[in-house]
Image (cartoon, rainbow, N blue to C red):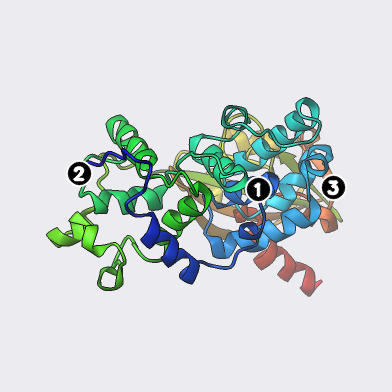
Amino acid sequence: MYENKDNDSPIAPELIQWYRIHKRDLPWRHTADPYRIWISEIILQQTRVAQGLDYYIRFISRFPDIVSLAEADNDEVMKYWQGLGYYSRARNLHAAARFMAEKYAGRFPKTYKEVLGLKGIGEYTAAAICSFSYGLPYATVDGNVYRVLSRLFAIDTPIDSTQGKKLFSGLANELLDRKNPGEYNQALMEFGALHCLPRSPKCNECPLSGKCLAYAEGQTEKYPLKQTKAIVKPRYFNYFHIILEDKTWIHRRNGNDIWRNLYEFPLIETDREMNLDEIQKTPGYKELFTGINTLYIQSIPYVCRHVLSHRIINAKFYTIYISCSGEHLDAYKCIENSSIGDYAVARLTESYLEKVWQDILSKK
């Protein structure tokens, strides 16, 4: 492999030169503020830069520092995160901000160990914050780094294995430019994102092609290797937008399931896809609508599908008008129909509200 005996990175000069010419102009690259770098890194964990940029600007505008985020209401934080998905990131951000407000008087900690101890921050994010903000010598290892290093050294150890994670972490730290760790880390990740692409990498114009073993073998797209593929399971959600004059009912998801702390309409989850007649025969439907006089049900639901990393959510939204509420609706929050937009919801519900409910309102 490679052993760095004199603390000089063999790839840093080419990478940093490439980076200074080709890097994207992004707002978090114009600051050493660890708070803003933290927010950007959390947003970009599961989000493309093109999508995350607007969210970052909006989030920072409302929560410009640790104290403003710590003092915010949970529902407001979730509303600002709405549409980004992986909502545990927002919950962890909020919890970490409150922790820093209490323990560090609203200041960001300055050691790698302390940063790593914040909720929702793993080794990669801690290394990014500490190297970008404080110039500390910690290597960042993300998907782009895995790809670049596996090709440079033609490493056939799966990146998702325990052995692979240890190997790549060690190699990344050996290659780290300790004199300029922040810019080097950003250069390596940007190089993977824009140049050393998963498909059709730009090998013919690559500043590292002379050092790349995968390129010499003509097998760049073989790397990196993975040992496992997540099993994606389907789930079937049947939502009921129940309307009584200008009122409707929602509730906040709890527990450890997806979309925790987001709001949704009454939900009946089934183990397979069902039509309305079948759903109406389920115990959940009978319980929900006990004592309710139904005036009208939109029998053709709004159907949408949402693919998560480990689940495919198949959702149907039924709009139902009633003349009186039943006792089981007491478990839900009764709100004005016009105020639905004030609550943070999952992308599926947002899609229904945009494409169906707004259309219904416009025809009234």
- Residue drawn where x is 42% and y is 66% of the image: 18
Tag on residue 335? 3
Q: Where does the image place residue 10, in percent across and percent down from the top left?
A: 32, 51
296 with respect to 259 (left or right): right
Q: Where does the image place residue 87, in percent across and percent down from the top left?
A: 62, 43
1 or 3: mark nearer the eye:
1
Local crowd at mark 2 within 10 Å, few (<14), some, or many (≥20)? some
Find the distance from the CA under tag 2 to the CA under tag 1. Answer: 34 Å
- Residue drawn where x is 83% and y is 50% of the image: 323
Q: Which tag, 2 or 1, sits closer to the chain's start? A: 1
Which amino acid type is marked by label 1?
A: Ile
Q: Where does the image place residue 153, in percent across and percent down from the top left?
A: 23, 49
Residue at the disc numbered 1: 39
Question: In the rendered image, which quarter contains the N terminus?
Answer: top left
Which amino acid type is marked by label 2?
A: Asp
Q: Quadrant of residue 166?
A: top left
Find the distance from the CA under tag 1 to the CA under tag 3. Answer: 32 Å
